[in-house]
Amino acid sequence: MNTLARYSDSFFGTMAAILSNTFILAMGALVLLAVIFYIIDVTQTTHTIRRNYPLIGRFRYFFEKLGEFFRQYFFAQDREELPFNRAQRSWVYRAAKNLDNTQAFGSTRDNDKEGHVLFVNAGFPVLEEEAQEIEPLIYGPYCRNPYSSSSIFNISGMSYGAISKPAVRALSQGAALAGCWMCTGEGALSKFHLEGGCDIVFQIGTAKYGVRDEHGHYSEAKLRAIADKPQVKMFELKLSQGAKPGKGGILPAVKVSAEIAEIRGIPEGQASISPNRHPDIANNRELLERINWLREITGKPVGIKFVLGDGSWLEDLLQAINEAGIEQAPDFFTLDSGDGGTGAAPMTLIDDVGLGIHEALPLLINKLDLYKLRERIRVITSGKLINPTDVAWALCVGADAVNNARGFMFSLGCIQALQCNKNTCPTGITTHDPKLQRGLVTEDKTERVANYQRNMVREVSMIAHSCGVEHPRKLSRRHARVVQSVNHSISLVEYYAPY
Ligand SMILES: Cc1cc2nc3c(=O)[nH]c(=O)nc-3n(C[C@H](O)[C@H](O)[C@H](O)COP(=O)(O)O)c2cc1C
Ligand code: SF4
């Protein structure tokens, strides 16, 4: 071997050694970094996905960021996805984190599309110093303990069982911080609902969980015990909900733990099937009798939740109320949209049964006006009203308050993975798997729930002030218009007159 060859061998040998050492060092550094990130992720308490999926969860944010750029060329646009598009969800996420929710450059919404709602700004908007607090409303003026609430945005029924313990706790504490009420859903009242100290609406579903005896009939003693709790302000008899009208819930045996069984008053480890309707209520006369019986026992306001389908049923009910006398009326109606959400329901019912809120709400308000019951029966409504313009629309049409379920789920960190009917919710909201629940840290999400509620009220108030009224309850149909075709909109007053 000549000198040059020897020199070149030793050069390449050294280079190879340097490169391989560098590679080993780089790999070592990468592994070390991965371990550090892993530890940071499992121990931090603010990001559910990173806590449940340490390290790989970080890629979600990276891909989300890249997605913003790629989507505009290849995939769904901001306003395309269902049930909630990215623009709607982003507003909630940002409101929940108390981040700036302003936008740059201009609207990405197609404002000329038929059905689009526009609010009409006043010549002279309300100054901040002229703005007023939202007036409280009385629910149940004829019962022993009427409820006074000024809240216009509240947490809709989601049962403990459909949603997890940390989710119920964060909602309860967030509602207390924000000053709104929380409906229990049909799964009865648990200590987790009470621990935040918020106002509670106790829902009675067709299986009467929490207020039933061993045969599934009402237990007066249990009703009185629930009503005795000062936090429980009202009772809501659920006739139907938008996602599954005419269908009772099924709680599979695996979900009927000792704790759930005790709270609901059912045998442990056995599937529990709710009837399609309240077996004790087959017509409007029986409905009014049951409402009055419940009101007498509990001493608190009693209302009904339903999704509107057959309009003649509603007319019959209002007629029956007028015949019985207004004291006998339900204290409130909770009107749900045909496209409401749930933990699990057949697609047929989810998709195609029950009127949507945009048709049902004006119809209900008009009928209440017609039967002169508008002042007597408060109207609460729900159904995809997750952004300020949705809530402002409902108030304009005539609702007294809005309930919301899925918006509050987004505030808890829901990423619309659509697995609520399995036990695999990646954000710990609709799963009973403790490993996945670990990611949902109550303290952090409590703040987000409260922020979402407060920012909602703030922006609905902003719309009200722009329309020239001092607070959101003063919004009326004359403050909004519906687009009919390009460059042509009409006032809600005119648009909803024939409903
Ligand atoms: C996970 C989940 C559980 C629910 N559980 C109940 C329930 O127990 N009782 C009820 O009346 N509605 C229940 N709902 C329906 C909501 O209360 C609400 O009526 C519906 O989702 C429409 O409102 P939203 O669009 O704000 O979600 C549930 C909804 C979800 C998403
Ligand atoms: S993340 Fe998915 S599974 Fe969990 S609550 Fe949201 S939609 Fe349901």
Image (tube, rainbow, N blue to C red):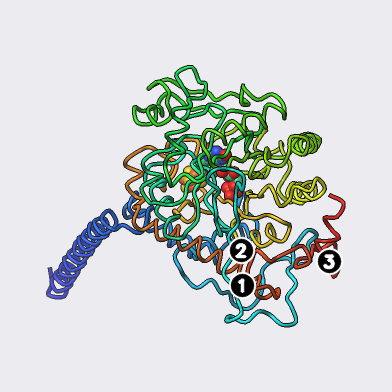
Look at discs 2 and 1 and give the one toward the viewer.
Answer: 1
Q: Position of residue 287 (x, y in %)?
A: 67, 30
Q: Position of residue 338 (x, y in %)?
A: 68, 42
Q: Secondary structure at mark 2?
A: helix
Reading the image, the residue beneath label 2 is: 388
Name the foreground residue: 72 vs 282.
282
Q: Secondary structure at mark 3?
A: strand
Residue at 50% across, 56% down: 180
Q: Could you tell me the amino acid type at mark 3?
A: Ser
Residue 318's place in the image compared with 373, above or below, is above
Residue at 58% across, 51% down: 403
How far is mark 2 from mark 1, CA to CA?
Answer: 9 Å
How far is mark 3 from mark 1, CA to CA?
Answer: 22 Å
Residue 175's place in the image compared with 240, above or below, is below
Inspect this view and state whether residue 336 appears: no
Q: Could you tell me the amino acid type at mark 1?
A: Met
Inspect this view and state whether residue 256 appears: yes
How far is mark 3 from mark 2, CA to CA?
Answer: 20 Å
Look at discs 3 and 1 and give the one toward the viewer.
Answer: 1
Q: Which mark is residue 427?
A: none
Reading the image, the residue beneath label 1 is: 462
Reading the image, the residue beneath label 3 is: 489
Q: Residue 71's image quarter?
A: bottom right
Residue 126's place in the image compared with 258, above or below, is below
Q: First in sequence, mark 3 or 1: give its number.
A: 1
For residue 253, side relative to residue 311 (left or right) = left
Residue at 68% across, 57% down: 394
- Which residue is at the far top? 215
Q: Are marks 2 and 1 in contact (CB under 8 Å)?
A: yes
Q: Position of residue 97 (x, y in %)?
A: 44, 65
